Amino acid sequence: MVAELRPAALDLIAGMKINGDDGLAQEYMEIFGHHGLSGAMLTRTQVEKIFANLVEVEELTDHSFDGLMTSVCGVAPKAIVSFLEARIVRAIALEEQGVDNDYEPIPSYSSWSVLRAAQDSEEYEDSLAAFVDLMKRYPRYEHRVSKIFWHMADVWPSTEPAGTAMFAALDRLLHTSDSEDALIVVRSLEDAPLGLTIHHPMFAIHILWTCAAFGEEIKNAAMHRLISNCFASGGVSAVQPGAPILVRSGLAEPWQQKVNELLSSCEPGSLAFELFKSIADSAQPVYHTLELQDFSEELDEAEEE
C-alpha cells in the first residue's frame, strides 16, 4: 500500500457499513485477520469504527473474530472490552423487546489466541480492569468474558515471572465485603493457564485466604479450583471395552519438584500447607476403566440365530 494513500484507505475500510450482514462481516473481519493486513497500521479511532460496524451482526465467526482481536489488541485493547459490552447491551435490549433473533453477543469459542500484543499498549492495565468490571456487571456472560480476559492476561505461559497487571485487576475483587466478588475470581480460574497455582503461589494463597474468610463452602470452592488448575483433564476419541482411559493428567517431574518445595516451606496446618499437600497427593495421573458392553459380540450372536 502506497504510504501516502494508506491513511485514506484505512479510513475507508474502517468506515464501511456492514448493516448486520453475517457473511459480509466475516470477510470484513478477515481484512485484519490472521492472514490479513496488520492491525498495527490502524489508529485507535479506526479500530473503534471497525468494532462499531460489527455490533449489529448476529453471529461473529469464531476464527475471524479471533484474528481481528489478535491483530488490533496492541492498538486499542480497551476498545475490545467496549465492543463486547456494546454487544451484551444489544443482546439484553433485544431480549427485553421480545425480538425473536439468533444474536450471540460473544462467541462460545474455546481456542482464543493469546492477545500478547495488548501488553505493549498504554491502555493495557485499564483494559484488564475493564474486563473484570464487565464480568462483575454482566454475570450471565461472565464465563465468556473470562476466557478472553485470561488470554489477554500477562501470564502466558504460566511459568513466566509476570502477571502483575492481571493480578492487580483481579485483586480488587478480593478486597471487598462481598463474597460474590471473590467467587468471580474463583470461577475465572477455570480459564487460567494450566499451572498458575504452582507458578504464582502467592496469588493462589491470597485467593484461598480471602475465600476462607467467607466460610467453609467458599473456601472449599477456591481450594477445588486451585487444585484443578494444576491438572489437565484427559480425553478420548475411541474407547475399547474394559480399556482404561485417562481422566486426569498427573504432574510432570519439574512441577512435582516445585510443589514439594512449596510444601516444605509451608507451616503444617496452614491453608497453604493444605493446598500444596492436596496437589502433591494428587500428583499421579488418574485412570478409570469403563465397563462398556461389547456390541460386536451381540451382533455376532444375533447373526448366528
Image: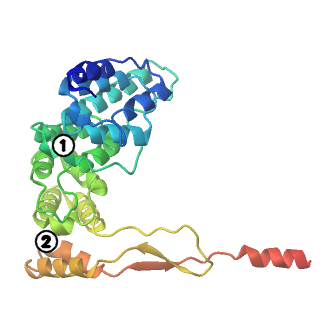
- Of circles 2 and 1, the one toward us is 1
Whether the residues at callouts 2 and 1 have beta carbons within 8 Å, the answer is: no
Q: Which residue is mark 2?
A: 272
In-front residue for pair 3/288: 3
Question: In the figure, is residue 45 to the left or right of 68?
Answer: left
Can residue 107 be seen at all in this image of the molecule?
Answer: no
Q: Position of residue 200 (x, y in %)?
A: 14, 64
In-front residue for pair 302/28: 28
Asked if 252 appears above or below 133 in the picture, the reply is: below
Asked if 302 appears above or below 146 in the picture, the reply is: below
Q: Position of residue 6 (x, y in %)?
A: 24, 24
Label 2: how many Cα within 10 Å (few below 14, some 14–19, many 20+): many
Q: Amino acid at mark 1?
A: Ala
Q: Amino acid at mark 2?
A: Ala
| Picture quadrant of residue 216 | bottom left
Secondary structure at numbered mark 2: helix
- What is the quadrant of the C terminus in the image? bottom right
| Picture quadrant of residue 130 | top left
Label 1: how many Cα within 10 Å (few below 14, some 14–19, many 20+): many
Question: In the figure, is residue 101 to the left or right of 29?
Answer: right
Between the residue at mark 2 and the residue at mark 1, the CA separation in whole angstroms equals 33 Å
Residue sticking out furthest to the front:
2
Q: Position of residue 102 (x, y in %)?
A: 50, 29
In-front residue for pair 32/300: 32
Q: Which residue is mark 1?
A: 118
Q: Residue at left 75%, top 75%?
A: 296
Can residue 157 be seen at all in this image of the molecule?
Answer: yes
Asked if 226 appears above or below 62 in the picture, the reply is: below
The earlier-in-sequence mark between 2 and 1 is: 1
